[in-house]
Image (tube, rainbow, N blue to C red):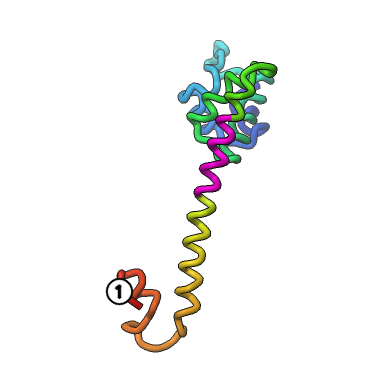
Amino acid sequence: MKIGELARKAGVNIDTVRYYERQGLLPPAPRLASGYRVYAGADLRRLRFVRQAKALGFTLEDIGELLPRSSRRHTDMPGRKATAAARLADVDRRIAELERIRTALQSLVEACPGHGSVEGCPILKALAGDPA
């Protein structure tokens, strides 16, 4: 299949396919005499793997480490688990930070009367670092 069909079937755009090739996440595709790249079913499966891993928050570096492990189905389970566990820990850190931000914003919204002078706005005071 040509690059456009591959991209469509994988749910990405053509530039993404080219980018993943440059990053080594997809092997360079053989070319026809016309210069068109030709992809196989294995390329589609690999591209879907990359897309799904990205959707789960894995970095391209993580994905680059996971791809060789994915072909060794019965080996390297600890390596795959460690990579996923590290990603999970990162997600937990992000959630904790977002919860902290949410609590702070909620307090500011509740403290704001929604009227009055700009000088007395608790939201602007907090953003400026002034005591409330």
Asked if residue 131 is among those painted magenta in the image, a careful observer would answer: no
Report the predominant secondary structure element of the magenta stretch.
helix
Q: Magenta segment range?
A: 82-93
Work out whether 51 lies above or below 117: above
Quadrant in which the C terminus appears: bottom left
Quadrant in which the N terminus appears: top right
As drawn, is 65 to the left or to the right of 126? Answer: right
Packing grade of label 1 (10 A; few <14, some 14-19, many >=20) is few
Locate residue 38, reporting x and y percent: 60, 18
Locate residue 8, reporting x and y percent: 64, 34
- Which quadrant holds residue 85? top right
Helix, strand or loop under label 1: loop
Residue at 67% in and 32% down:
9
Work out whether 88 lies above or below 40: below
Q: Nearer the viewer, residue 130 or 23?
A: 130
Residue at 48% in and 60% down:
100
Which residue sits furthest top? 33
- The residue that mark 1 highlights is 130
Residue type at tag 1: Asp
Work out whether 30 lies above or below 97: above
Locate residue 59, reporting x and y percent: 50, 35
- Which quadrant holds residue 31? top right
